[in-house]
């Protein structure tokens, strides 16, 4: 930090086990990537190349190298995994991970119908190759999953070998964990936390109000994902109580 302030919440240090910020790259140019890394690399723990943008991005390996040189791991969006699986190309997906020297991958079923036992088999297989992040929840706004089922799915995926589970919200933050308005399904989140440790969950929270809600509930070291690259530093100030939304949250009565 550039100067000293009292009563700033303690943040975990990279490489973190929790307190994660997962940034979502939806197609940044190489120059944009360099600019983001110059300003925000200290606060980005992992980068997701959103959905299947890696299929069409023209300089994929060059971009991956930029992140690698900055010490930031990357992974391909879960939609790409689903695109391979639905075409019976799981082995090709595994080869792709090796070809790109990926250390992480996402397993999801937000866009396809996948028996959960089969999803867990994919997690188990991939966990022997890379570190697996598994996503729970549907991209279909009409599909409401009850809290007990979220807990059951998350636990089974962790047991299958997932390093962390991701709560689905899409890049817009209006499905899964959230209502169509972006409001948090607070009862759902609080019930999940009665059974699944907060350190094991990355909450997709692209909207500022959602980020504030999770930080106030869990603390500065909550894992948050689907953060726009240019919102990484603003998020860090929210985590530290240096923005109006959380300004008083970490202060004691006597400053």
Image (tube, rainbow, N blue to C red):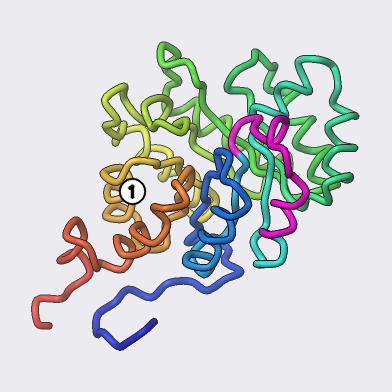
- Towards the viewer: 101 or 218: 101
The vertical placement of 249 against 89, above or below, is below
- Residue 1 versus residue 148 in the image, above or below: below
In the picture, the quarter occupied by the N terminus is: bottom left
According to the image, label 1 marks what residue? 211
User: Residue lying furthest front in this view?
Assistant: 31
Q: Residue furthest left?
A: 253
Residue 252: image quadrant is bottom left
Residue 58: x, y in percent? 72, 38
Give the magenta part as a residue range. 50-67
The one of 34 and 23 positioned closer to us in this rendering: 34
Residue 24 place in picture, x, y as percent:
53, 44
Q: Nearer the viewer, residue 69 or 205?
A: 69
For image coordinates 27% across by 55% down, the residue present is: 216
* Left or right of 224 in this view: 82: right
Q: Is residue 39 magenta?
A: no
Residue at image coords 81%, 15%: 87
Instruction: Name the secondary structure under disc 1.
Output: helix
Left/right of residue 231 with respect to residue 30 in the rendered view = left
Helix, strand or loop for the magenta stretch, by majority: helix
Where is residue 147? Give x, y as percent. Answer: 42, 28
Up-down relation of residue 100 to residue 91 (above or below): below
Identity of the residue drawn at 30% across and 88% down: 4
Residue 46, x across and y down, in percent: 60, 55
How many marks can you see?
1
User: Is residue 53 covered in magenta?
Assistant: yes
Residue at 64% from the left image edge and 15% from the top image edge:
112
Q: Which quadrant is home to the C terminus?
A: bottom left
Structural crowding at the residue carrying mark 1, measured as other residues with C-alpha within 10 Å and reported as few (<14), some (14–19) or many (≥20): many
């Amino acid at each position: 930090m550039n100067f000293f302030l009292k009563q700033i919440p303690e943040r975990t240090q990279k490489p973190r086990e929790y307190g994660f910020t997962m940034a979502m790259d939806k197609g940044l140019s190489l120059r944009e990537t360099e600019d983001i890394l110059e300003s925000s690399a200290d606060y980005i723990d992992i980068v997701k190349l959103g959905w299947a943008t890696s299929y069409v991005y023209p300089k994929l390996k060059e971009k991956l190298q930029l992140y690698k040189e900055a010490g930031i791991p990357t992974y391909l969006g879960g939609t790409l995994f689903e695109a391979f699986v639905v075409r019976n190309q799981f082995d090709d997906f595994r080869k792709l991970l090796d070809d790109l020297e990926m250390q992480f991958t996402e397993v999801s079923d937000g866009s396809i119908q996948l028996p959960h036992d089969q999803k867990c088999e994919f997690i188990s297989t991939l966990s022997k190759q890379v570190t697996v992040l598994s996503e729970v929840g549907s991209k279909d706004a009409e599909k409401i999953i009850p809290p007990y089922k979220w807990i059951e799915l998350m636990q089974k995926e962790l047991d299958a070998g997932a390093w962390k589970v991701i709560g689905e919200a899409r890049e817009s933050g209006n499905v899964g964990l959230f209502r169509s308005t972006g409001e948090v399904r607070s009862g759902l989140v609080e019930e999940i936390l009665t059974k699944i440790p907060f350190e094991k969950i990355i909450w997709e929270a692209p909207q500022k109000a959602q980020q504030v809600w999770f930080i106030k509930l869990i603390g500065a070291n909550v894992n948050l994902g689907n953060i726009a690259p240019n919102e990484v530093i603003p998020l860090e100030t929210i985590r530290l109580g240096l923005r109006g939304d959380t300004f008083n949250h970490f202060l004691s009565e006597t400053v």
